[in-house]
Amino acid sequence: MAPGYKVFFSELDNPQHYAELKESIKAGKITDAKETVSERSKLLYPEYLVSATPADSNAYNNQTNPDGAKNDKGHLGDPEFKSLFNKDHKKFDLSPNLGTEIDGIQLSELDDQGKNDLALFLETRGLAIFRNQDFRDKGPEFAVNFGKYFGPLHIHPVAYSTEKHPELFVTFRKAGDGSRYNEQFRHTTSTIAWHSDVSFEEYPSSFSIFVALEAPESGGDTLFLDGREAYKRLSAPMQKFLEGLTVIHSNYGQNKFAALRNQVARIKADYFTEHPLVRTHPVTGEKSLFFSRLFVQKVKGLKQTESDAILNFLEDHVNNNPEIQVRAAHKGTDSRSVILWDNRILMHSHCNDFLQHETTARHHFRVTCIGEKPYLDNSESSSNEKPQAY
Ligand SMILES: [Fe+2]
């Protein structure tokens, strides 16, 4: 029989593995909440360091955006992006389909029409990497207000955030001396975890804005894959079959791991949320494979072996296809990079390729905009409606 589909973090249900992990955290081999606070004095941007005890532990509420599809700023964007690219700049496409690197535009100076164009640009190219930004020096308040232009901001149920701004999701790994490599790969050969941000929510993210505060010169890239192209590559009968499926996403494992690491917890609840496996973009009408591997548990209504077979096929389909993937390099602290993407059409993953080396800290914050409730629109106006000829 084919191997089962491995749900992320399911190893924590194994008491021996759980006990080993607890021991590693106690021994300081894995980052925990206490460590992130104790590193404060060494950081370039301590105001963005996490708080172990959030100012408002009840900040997390049921976060929705019922008119998200209608109110998406991309509807107001100019397809020629004239207010985004209105002066000298350099632009480089990472691939013809996906991702663009831009230098010479200052995000903090965009007016409303520039931001509308930015939304549409992300919805078209999926990913934009802006270099030499002053974003991180404008302060947390600026970041929050910038993000709010695109929709309500998500407050993560368990992830680290700054003390006064729970909307700022912080990722932090202290400066490395190479000693954590063995621990990270003790039980696995890869830590790649493709996902769409907070897809376990009923209203998951539209845009993520990921701001580098400190980054290694090389390594620790963010990897991206194109859900639109992942959908298009499939045969018409397979597309049709997948369009009929609903998938269950959950934060169950993430919550369990967070508790083990003494992360802040604004909620105790585990969500099991249903989303269509193929979703339609509210602005472009494009269909995309919404396979958020990190949070996907099961296909609703299928028997376990059927669900395992489909999900394993999809994992192989996206994992083993560099033709639909690009990587965004942060390129060190001095690159002052801000990376933005559209979670409705892209999946992404961290890349732990630097742990065996001596590096600077890796410290970022993310502003996460809440999008619409995912839906599939098979009406005539949907742009991918016509089956492809294979
Ligand atoms: Fe993410």
Image (cartoon, rainbow, N blue to C red):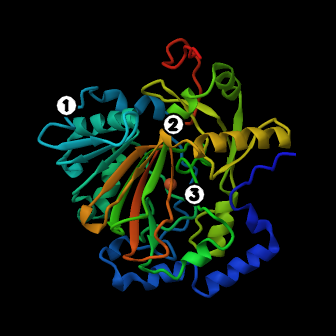
Label 1 vs label 3, nearer the camera: 3
| Label 3 environment density (alpha carbons within 10 Å; few <14, some 14–19, many ≥20) | some
Q: CA distance from mark 1 to mark 3?
A: 37 Å
Q: Amino acid at mark 3?
A: Ile
Q: CA distance from mark 2 to mark 1?
A: 26 Å
Residue pictured at 55% horizontal, 16% vertical: 385
Residue bearing mark 1 = 82
Q: Camera-side residue: 278 or 259?
A: 278
| Label 1 environment density (alpha carbons within 10 Å; few <14, some 14–19, many ≥20) | few
Extreme residue toward the left, this view: 88
**Residue 73 appears in view:** no
Q: CA distance from mark 3 to mark 2?
A: 27 Å
| Image vertical order of residue 315 relative to residue 160, above or below | above
Under tag 1, what secondary structure?
loop
| Image vertical order of residue 59 relative to residue 45, above or below | above
Location of residue 144 (image quadrant): bottom left
The picture places residue 213, in percent across and down from the top left corner, at 33, 67
The picture places residue 293, in percent across and down from the top left corner, at 63, 48
The tag on residue 372 is 2
Q: Amino acid at mark 2?
A: Glu
Residue pictured at 19% horizontal, 50% vertical: 106
The picture places residue 187, in percent across and down from the top left corner, at 69, 70
